[in-house]
Image (tube, rainbow, N blue to C red):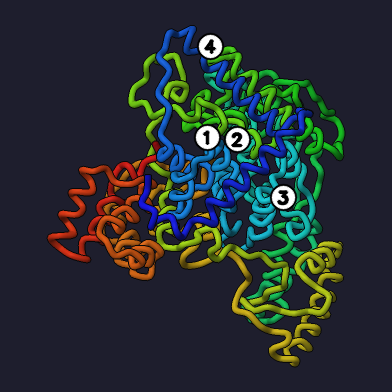
Amino acid sequence: MLRSSLMKPVQCLLSALLGASLMLSVYGQNKKISPGSREHMEAAAHKVDQHVAALFKRKQLTVPDGISDEIFLRRTALVVAGRIPTFDESVAFLESSSPDKRKLLINYYMASPGYRSSMTNWLFDLLRVQENFTRRGASAAAYIDFLRESIAYNKPWDKLTSELITAEGSIWENGAVGYYIRDKGMPLDNLANTMRTFTGTRMECAQCHDHPYEDWERRDYFRLAAFSNKQSEINGQSYRELYRSLNKEDNRKNPKYQLLRHLGDSIYYTSLENPGSGRIKLPSDYQYRDADPGEWVGARTPFGKMIRMSDRRDADDGKKRFSEWLVSPENPRFASVIVNRMWRRIMGTGLYEPVDEYVEPEKTASPELTRFLIKLMQDLDYDLQKFQQVLLLTRTYTFSTSPDLRDPSVAYDFHGRQLQRMSAEQVWDSLVTLTSEHPDQLPSRTFSKAIYLNGKHLNLEGKNMATLSREILSLDNADKLDKYLDKLIAEAGDSKGKQDRMMKGGSRPGPASGLARASELPTPAPAGHFLREFGQSDRLLVDSSSREPNVGQILDTLNGQVETMVVSNESAALHKRLSSYSSPEDKIRVIFLSILSRTPTALEMAIMKEEVAQTGDKAYPNIISALLLTREFLFVQ
């Protein structure tokens, strides 16, 4: 048991957890079982364990030991909320005598802002989200806000996918448009990323030649590209024509020219029209006998339900038909791939690896389990939050870490979680947790549709970026655009005359700065930032983050960000809490509970007390620094 003096600050949290237990028992009186209900999720978790048990029996494997409460607490906080537990959370959970406290902890973290933060990091990495679409500054803020809102409201995965694939219009009215703007000018690359992300199909080789190892032919690739072909900016010709007439050396300080360039980046560039023509011309270097260079081919799906479109005339529903095929139950890959991604997120290793290279259920370690999980995902209507909660409720999730494979034909996670370094975001957010008493209440990213010009807020009455883009994009020739700009400049001139009421603010709202969760900072963090040093993705490739160690991480840990954020920062939450206790034993317990989510062993306590006896108060920063360098802190067990 923990010392009672450590319990005083956390009675409220403990009471909240016990109160949640009472609510669960009341909820459990409802005997009607429907997909997504507590009873359904617990039954599904039990079924998962039965499939794993059957595999163990068939392979004659020894069932791994279960993990302790301390490891369960820390593992769940890192996996679900993306950070280590706070001191209060650790003490409340470890002191609780509730028989349901593990389920309650899962509920607590799944409902927390930390879960949304962690899932946002996952989605940004998967979709290669960056702050700007171009070096000139075409902002991705509306796209980022769309994705964050999708996570916040737990939008079903099939619905989010469809919204991205069918996106049209202005990004200020439909943030999903950013999915295509991210790869603007590279439609074939966008298709490659789409197939890899949502179907686990690596077709990029087929852009240039028939795939050497798979069945994909180059013509198959272009037939898929045909679904979304002929997308373009909305009335972009109006902008380009006026830009050519104004783009002269002696005209570049002209307010109209500057305004036009700003509108080009922020409105025209981030707009999208054409619902997909459904046909495309083969490239001039097409080299196979099954078609001629420059020949029109109609859209066609390569697996699942066959969808074919005409090669003789343009259609007006190519993206819609592609989306319907992509998320259809008849496409075996869509559900399987997201199941595998969620399994790896919770269990540490995929049902098959790499997670973005589809494997048929029959070729996985447990075909029965794989098929069950695919059916479960569909029954839950692609609710990723509930699906992950099912996995968290399994006994399989609580298997202890195993350092060795017992059977090379069996996926690692079935017989013990693979010991894994924290991701860059988990390390950063854990340091933030030690620095701030309430890590999920720190400043967050903000978003606004207000109009900004040259870094200043331009308050045009009745207009924001959505209404402005709607008006701008409706202008179908350069003369109309020219007259509209004159009118806009006149309105802006009137606004300037009203001084502070109309012109205020330094820049468009966006990512947080300073101490904040990783999901609230610029995406990706700038080069040299702690997050990048620890392997955060540069968002250029799908899933390109790294957990490999390097020299920069050692420097950051010994003398850099770790030192300034936590070790020597007397205003950090950990140091403030230490000041509330007088005895060395209590201080040492606080440090261990805060950093490792457990109390020290008798031997560790003796060593730490000896350090305090020799160096006095200087010992505590030394102990903090030492624990932050341990594998126990840096790895997820």
Real-space Cα distance between discs 2 and 4? 22 Å
Q: At 31% across and 51% down in the image, what residue appears?
A: 628
Residue 388 numbered mark, or none: 2
Q: Which residue is mark 1?
A: 346
- Of the residues shown, which amino acid type is indicated by label 3? Ala
Real-space Cα distance between discs 1 and 3? 27 Å
Q: Secondary structure at mark 3?
A: helix
Q: Nearer the viewer, mark 4 or mark 3?
A: 4
Q: Which residue is mark 4?
A: 54
Q: Residue furthest left?
A: 614
Q: Secondary structure at mark 2?
A: helix
- Of the residues shown, which amino acid type is indicated by label 4? Ala
Q: Nearer the viewer, residue 204 or 288?
A: 204
Position of the N terminus, as image quadrant, is top left
Q: Secondary structure at mark 1?
A: helix
Q: Residues within 10 Å of mark 2 (few under 14, many from 20)?
A: many
Mark 2 in CB contact with mark 4 (< 8 angstroms): no
Residue 176 numbered mark, or none: 3
Q: Nearer the viewer, residue 111 or 317?
A: 111
- Of the residues shown, which amino acid type is indicated by label 1? Ile
Left or right of residue 314, residue 270 in this image: left
Real-space Cα distance between discs 2 and 1? 7 Å
Q: At 37% across and 16% down in the image, what residue appears?
A: 406
Left or right of residue 255, residue 474 in this image: right
Sequence order check: which comes first, mark 2 or mark 4?
Answer: 4
Mark 2 in CB contact with mark 1 (< 8 angstroms): yes
- Of the residues shown, which amino acid type is indicated by label 2? Gln
Sequence order check: which comes first, mark 4 or mark 3?
Answer: 4
Mark 4 in CB contact with mark 3 (< 8 angstroms): no
201 is higher (above) or lower (below) than 315: above
Real-space Cα distance between discs 4 and 3? 43 Å
- Residue 434 is situated, as x and y percent measured from the top left of the image, at 40, 58
